[in-house]
Image (spheres, rainbow, N blue to C red):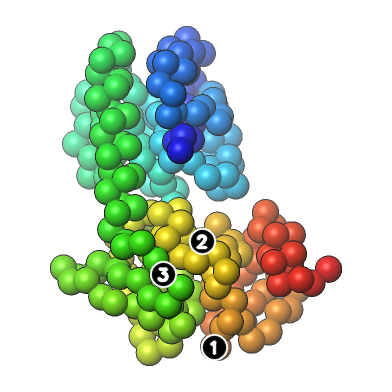
Amino acid sequence: MKLKCIIIDDEQIARQIIETYCNHIDWLEVVSSCSNALHAKSFIETHDVDIAFLDINMPVLDGIAFLKTLRLPPQVIFTTAYKEYAVEAFDLNACDYLLKPFSFERFIQAVDKAREKITKTSSQLQIATESFTYLRADGKIFKIDLEDLQYAEANGNYVKVVLDDGQFTTAMTFNSFEDLLPKSKFIRVHRSFIVNKSKIRIIEGNRIMMKETEIPIGANYRDDFFKTIRIK
């Protein structure tokens, strides 16, 4: 499976170098190349992105500030000429910090680290069955009956899991969580929400009522959702 990448840098040459590096690695796919953070933010909010190569010194919104605005950040590899921001970058859970100019060898080390983190996050869930799965939270592993799972909500690199009798938070990406749920029972209805189809009570406009909780239906997910529940 290829990892989807976005390049965010106001310098065209810098973007071209990173894209060339990516093209040499068969499991990387550049899905967007942006000259400013605002365009990148719009793209990330409407598309699945696994890795972001992010410059720091950019007009309007710098890389550090941009990362702070993302509710669901991908794995971020900073690519910058300014070493003084490294501490703050890692405080924001950046995967790596590449100082320009960086070699292809150093680039490979960074993307390997990103892939390892993505793979590790995916493996935190055991392979889901039709009836139960396992989730890690608070230093423990919990067996979860999927019939009790109402919905899940993304929150950065964490997922809030809401059950019939409570809720908890697990550290993993939302895409990884989605991949390990049976598609016959669960559907993603929004960039930040996955619901148990059997728990849906009412659908009104772009809203789903799940017991006592209202879930939005995202514009990019609306058509697939209604096709899945066989409503035209």
Residues tagged 2 and 1 counted as in contact (Cβ below 8 A): no
| Mark 2, secondary structure of its residue | loop
Q: Residues within 10 Å of mark 1 (few under 14, many from 20)?
A: few
Q: Quadrant of the N terminus?
A: top left
Q: Which residue is mark 3?
A: 129
Q: Position of residue 58 (x, y in %)?
A: 44, 25
| Mark 1, secondary structure of its residue | loop
Name the amino acid, label 1: Glu
Closer to the N terminus: mark 3 or mark 1? 3
| Mark 3, secondary structure of its residue | loop
Q: CA distance from mark 3 to mark 1?
A: 27 Å
Q: Quadrant of the C terminus?
A: bottom right
Tell whether 169 sits left or right of 74.
left
Q: Which residue is mark 1?
A: 212
Q: Position of residue 35 (x, y in %)?
A: 54, 24
Closer to the N terminus: mark 2 or mark 1? 2
Name the amino acid, label 2: Ser
Q: CA distance from mark 2 to mark 3?
A: 23 Å
Residues tagged 2 and 3 counted as in contact (Cβ below 8 A): no
Which of the two marks, 2 or 3, is nearer to us in this view?
Answer: 3
Q: Which residue is mark 2?
A: 192
